[in-house]
Image (cartoon, rainbow, N blue to C red):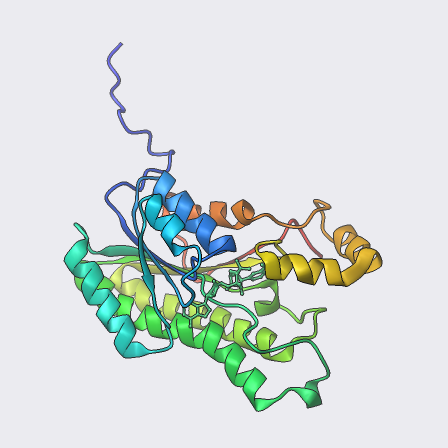
Amino acid sequence: MVDIHPRNPWQIDLSGRTVIVSGASWGIGQCIVEAFLACGADVHCCDIRADGLDELADKGAHVRQIDLTVPTDVEEWMVAIEKDADNPVSVLVNNAGGFGQSKPGEFVEVTDAEWESAYKVNADTTFVLSRAVVKRMINSGGGRIINISSGAGLNASTTQNHAYTAAKHAVTGLTRQMAFGLGKYGITVNGVAPGFVISSPETEAFWDDMGPEIQRRHIENVFLRRTGIVGDIAGPVIFLASDLAGWMSGQVLAVNGGKL
Ligand SMILES: NC(=O)c1ccc[n+]([C@@H]2O[C@H](COP(=O)([O-])OP(=O)(O)OC[C@H]3O[C@@H](n4cnc5c(N)ncnc54)[C@H](O)[C@@H]3O)[C@@H](O)[C@H]2O)c1
C-alpha cells in the first residue's frame, strides 16, 4: 500500500527549526534541549555557567556561555546564531531563572540585593533575550516563545520567598502582555509554570532540608502524589513549540501533578 501521508501531522517533528533555549546547564533546561534535539531541531542554548554545556555540545547542540542580563552580549550571540543557522529562529524557550540570592523569610527582612537578584535572574533574562529574538521573529514572519515561570508565578508560595514570587509573577505578566501585542506578527507567547521538580543538586538539597514531615505534606497536596521530574516540564514545552499548539497564546500552563 502506498503511504499517502509520509509525515504524520500528529507526531512532533521539528526538523529544520532553529530553537534557542536559555539556562541549559542542568535540570529542566538541559532536558528541554535534549527533547528538541530528539525532535530534530537545530538547538542553540546557553547558560551563565559553563558546566553541562560541553555535554550538550557532544549531543549536537550549539552552546554559549553568556550572562543574559548583558544586552550587548545577547546581541552578539544573536548575530552568531544568524550566521550559523540554516533558518531564522522559530522557537525561544526562556528557561533561565532560579532564586538568585533570594531566600524564604519574613517580608520586612527582604534585602535590596535579594530583590534585585531575583528580578535579574528571572525577569531581566526573559526580557533581554526575548527583545533580541522578537525583533528577528517579526522580520521572519512569526515564531513561538515559551517562558518558564513557576507555581510561584501564579499564586503565593508556601516557600515564602517574596522576591522570587514577585519576579516569577513578572515573567507571567510579561508572557501575557507579549502574547497580546505579538499575535499580529504571528508570534505565540505562552508559559509553563512548574510545580516542585527535583532538577539539580540544589533542588535535591532543598528537598532533603524539608525533612520527612514537610515532604509528606507536600506530596499529599499533589494529585499525582509525587514531585516532578525534568521530563514532566519538557513535554508541555515541546507541545507549545509544535504545530499542535498553533492557536494557543497568552496561556500559562500549570504543570505540577495537579493542585487545588
Ligand atoms: N526546579 C523546580 O522545582 C522549579 C519550579 C518552578 C520553576 N522552576 C523554574 O524552571 C527553570 C529551570 O529550573 P531548574 O530547577 O532546572 O534550574 P535552575 O533554577 O537552577 O536554573 C536555570 C539555569 O538558569 C541559569 N541562569 C541564571 N541566570 C542566568 C543568566 N543571567 N544568564 C544565563 N543563564 C542564567 C542558571 O545558571 C541555571 O543553570 C527556572 O526558571 C526555575 O525558576 C523550577
Does the rendering let one see residue 138? no
Residue at figure coordinates x 45%, y 52% from the top left:
30
Where's residue 97, x and y in %? 49, 68
x then y, percent, for residue 223? 72, 47
Q: Quadrant of the N terminus?
A: top left
Q: Is residue 171 left or right of residue 59?
A: right
Left or right: residue 87 versus residue 162 is left
Residue 173 lies, in percent from the top left, at: 48, 73
Name which residue lies at 44% across and 50% down: 32
The residue positioned 48% from the left and 48% from the top of the image is 234
Q: Residue at x 19, y 66 (%)?
A: 79
Residue 193: name its quadrant. bottom right
Q: Is residue 224 visible?
A: yes
In the displayed orientation, state which residue is furthest to the top: 1
Q: In the figure, 178 relative to 5: above or below? A: below
Q: Relative to 52, is 188 on the left or the right?
A: left
Camera-side residue: 31 or 242? 31
Q: Quadrant of the C terminus?
A: bottom right
Instruction: In the displayed orientation, state which residue is furthest to the right.
Output: 213
Image quarter for residue 164?
bottom right
Q: Image quadrant of residue 166? A: bottom right
User: Who is closer to the viewer here, 135 or 159?
Assistant: 159
| Number of numbered markers | 0
**Depicted 111 relative to depicted 72: above or below:** below
